[in-house]
Image (tube, helix red, strand yellow):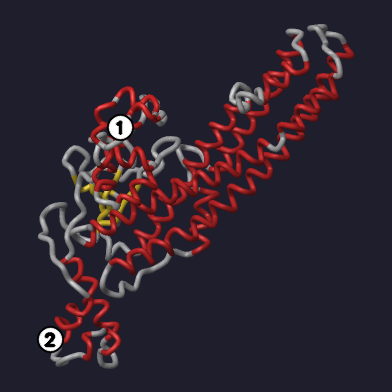
Amino acid sequence: MADTWNEELLDAMIRHQIGLLRFDAGVRNRVWKLLDATEADMRAQIANRLRRNVAGEITPANLQRMDALLRGLRETRTGAWSKVNQLMFEEMRALAIAEPAFQAQLMEGIFPVELGLNLPDPARLRAIVAKNAFDGETLKQMLARVKAADIRRIEQSVRIGMTQGESIPEIGRRIVGSVGLRGTNGVTEITRRNAATIARTAVNGVGAAARREFAEANADLAPLQVFIATLDSRTTPVCRKWDGSLHDTETGLATAPPQVKGQPTPVLPLHPGERSLFSFAVDGEVIGERPVRNFTQQGLVREYAEQNGLGKIPGSKRGNLPLGHKGKFDEWARGRMRELTGTVPAKTTYGQFLSRQSAAFQNDILGPTRGKLFRSGGLTLDKFVDKTGAEIPLRDLSKFHADAFRSAGLDPANF
């Protein structure tokens, strides 16, 4: 259970970020499905257009076959990329509109007063998708770059295969890979990885930009934001630099710690595949200077009523305030809440966040076995991934950390 409203907000923001990563995975899988749907067609075109091995012969007839094949492959793949573009823009526009509304709902649900939050203009939010640069490129530019490289690799594979006298199945495998390896040995696998990076970069970039618009529209309530760069155990140097830093929403400058104070607030994403986020800090002071205070809307109503000589309010409910006082109460409560709210912790790591969650939530994130190892085996999150950030299989974990398995009540021999 979070100790302060700000900590509860931070936990909720990180949960939401995990949800965005799942959303990103869904978008990525739909992009893959559109691209993968062309692979059977491309195999068929290779077989039908070539019909026989060309044995490396550069003849007019073979060149004609190759040109016809390349045109067909290019048309097929271009059609798929048109669908990918449409999908990405539709999903990102929907995300841009939904994100501020979610943030408002989240904050209204956590804080015990009616905040009267402002939502950014929808047209401005939709423009994020078309105009904002994510890692130096707009979404349109990212998609165009990966599409061009994808088609170039496919065409190059055909040329290499034909000039080297490869068989028709070999040329097909060179492009889309073998069935036994699920296509991972073909050049289209590079495109899958690049498409996954675009999806993650776009989802986090659009989400971050929409939250930034929301923060600016409500700067009086959330004057500070804190940079959280530790959603997993593998963090880039640039994100480590900003981790835990505070930023003034209105000026767009860092206010702490000293090594970054006065520098412009970084714009997410900072790199492809970015997963960091900003969380709102409703207290206007530097982290750690305010005591924890428990407060409710009823308590605020009682305090407001006493200050204004209104006597006892039935049920201490906002709705029972006299005519003309509800709006005045809301304005007063926003300022009073900032005075009484605890502050966001400066160094909440993903591991610390996850350790505060229920076993069920931990198992949802890590899986049941890794969840037990995390709770009872003493394994920290960095032990579950290799140097590339890939998840280590349980059979290998059981060899590396047999004692941790036994401490968690698991027999390493069973893995």
Residue ID for mark 2: 306
Crowding near pointer 2: few (<14 within 10 Å), some, many (20+)?
Answer: few
In this orientation, does residue 56 appear? Answer: yes
The residue labelled by disc 1 is: 382
Foreground label between 1 and 2 = 1
- Image position of 61 with respect to 369: above or below: above
Question: Can you say whether 17 is above or below 219 in the image?
Answer: above
Secondary element under disc 2, as helix, strand or loop, is helix
Is 152 situated above or below 310? above
Does residue 262 appear left or right of residue 192 in this picture? left
Vertical side of 3 occupied by 391: above or below? above
Kind of residue indicated by mark 2 = Glu
Residue 52 percent location from the top left of the image: 85, 15
Q: Is residue 150 left or right of residue 50?
A: left
Residue appearing at x 50%, y 52% in the figure: 128
Give the quadrant of residue 177.
Answer: top right
Q: Amino acid at mark 1?
A: Asp
Circle 1/circle 2 CB separation < 8 Å: no
Residue 389 shows up from this direction: no
Tell me where residue 182 appears, x and y as whole percent.
61, 28
Q: Position of residue 90 (x, y in %)?
A: 59, 53
- Along the viewing direction, whichever of 115 and 357 lies nearer the viewer: 357
Quadrant of the image containing the C terminus:
top left
Mark 1 or mark 2: whose residue is earlier in sequence: 2
Q: Nearer the viewer, residue 231 or 244?
A: 231
Q: Residue at x 15, y 88 (%)?
A: 308
Q: Name the residue located 33 percent from the left edge and 68 percent from the top edge.
A: 109
